[in-house]
């Protein structure tokens, strides 16, 4: 087992009771018996710990990931080392960009890291590509999935370029609260800054402002949401007087 936070961590193979591969691909029933057999025979089950790096950009071609349980995040890394989270992958999601070697002219060099202990199936990229080339349902599904992810990325880029930081921070805190099922979040200012693609000092100033307005309460390594309604209005860009 590799330790959490090891950027060179290799996902470990596991034997646990998890959903069948057929439950992770929405188009499974439209694949031929031959294609189903090939995918099932090639897929391996992996388990990683929180903090483990799973995919390290275009030079790495792990394969397609089908998430069974846990939580991953995809992000990009600037030349200065600043991170920007693009989207999360939860149970039931599929990650194509970890099979970047079969994606022609992919314009984004994505990193994928586990945020929680995560179990997922891995389909080797050459196998997935060979099935996709002869299966119209799988090819169409792949194109739809890529379009959906690029739409998320483009929306995020618009927020970074034109959105207000207070709105983005409020939306992030609400999203984190929903994912964790709690108003008490274990999150450092540095981690929040990495998600939002900004400097830690900017996050610190904004959180202190939120605290002064009664929206959050700050403690070492944690943020507690105190006024969700006010945060929701801010995230939606509605003036304070609107209820």
Image: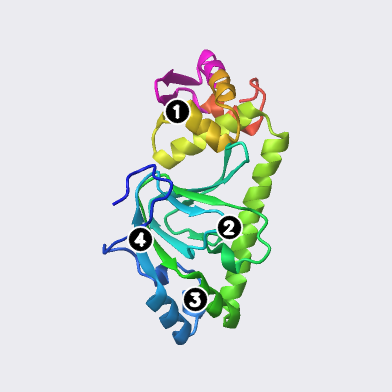
Label 4: which residue? 46
Q: Nearer the viewer, mark 2 or mark 1?
A: 2
The answer to which of marks 4 and 3 sits earlier in the sequence is: 4
Closest to the observer, 237 or 196: 196
Q: Nearer the viewer, mark 4 or mark 2?
A: 2
The answer to which of marks 2 and 1 sits earlier in the sequence is: 2
Where does the image place residue 170, in percent across and percent down from the top left? 56, 30
Judged left or right of residue 50, residue 163 is right
* SS assignment at label 1: loop
Span highlighted in magenta in the image: 207-228
Reply above or below: 119 against 229: below
Q: How is the image coloured?
A: rainbow
The answer to which of marks 4 and 1 sits earlier in the sequence is: 4
Label 2: which residue? 58
Outermost residue toward the top in this view: 212
Label 1: which residue? 188
Q: CA distance from mark 4 to mark 2?
A: 21 Å
Residue 211 shown in magenta: yes
Going 53% across and 21% down the picture, which residue do you hit? 204
Reply above or below: 22 against 178: below
Q: Residues within 10 Å of mark 2 (few under 14, many from 20)?
A: some
Q: CA distance from mark 4 to mark 1?
A: 29 Å
Where does the image place residue 74, in percent across and percent down from the top left? 53, 49
Dividing the picture into quadrants, the one containing residue 21 is bottom left
The numbered dot on residue 127 is: 3
């Amino acid at each position: 087992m590799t330790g959490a936070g090891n950027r060179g961590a290799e996902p470990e193979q596991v034997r646990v009771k998890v959903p069948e591969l057929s439950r992770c691909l929405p188009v499974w029933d439209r694949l031929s018996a031959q294609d189903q057999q090939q995918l099932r025979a090639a897929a391996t089950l992996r388990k990683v710990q929180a903090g483990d790096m799973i995919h390290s950009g275009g030079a790495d071609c792990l394969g397609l990931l089908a998430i069974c349980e846990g939580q991953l995040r995809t992000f990009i890394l600037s030349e200065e080392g600043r991170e920007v989270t693009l989207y999360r992958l939860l149970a039931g999601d599929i990650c194509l960009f970890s099979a970047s070697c079969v994606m022609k002219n992919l314009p984004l060099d994505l990193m994928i890291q586990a945020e929680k202990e995560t179990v997922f199936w891995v389909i080797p990229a050459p196998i997935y590509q060979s099935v996709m080339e002869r299966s119209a349902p799988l090819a169409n599904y792949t194109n739809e999935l890529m379009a959906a992810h690029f739409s998320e990325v483009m929306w995020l880029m618009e927020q970074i370029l034109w959105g207000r930081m207070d709105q983005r921070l409020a939306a992030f805190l609400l999203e984190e609260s929903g994912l964790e099922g709690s108003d008490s979040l274990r999150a450092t200012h540095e981690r929040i800054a990495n998600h939002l693609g900004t400097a830690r000092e900017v996050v610190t100033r904004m959180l202190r402002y939120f605290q002064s307005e009664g929206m959050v309460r700050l403690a070492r390594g944690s943020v507690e949401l105190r006024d969700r309604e006010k945060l929701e209005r801010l995230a939606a860009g509605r003036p304070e007087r609107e209820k």
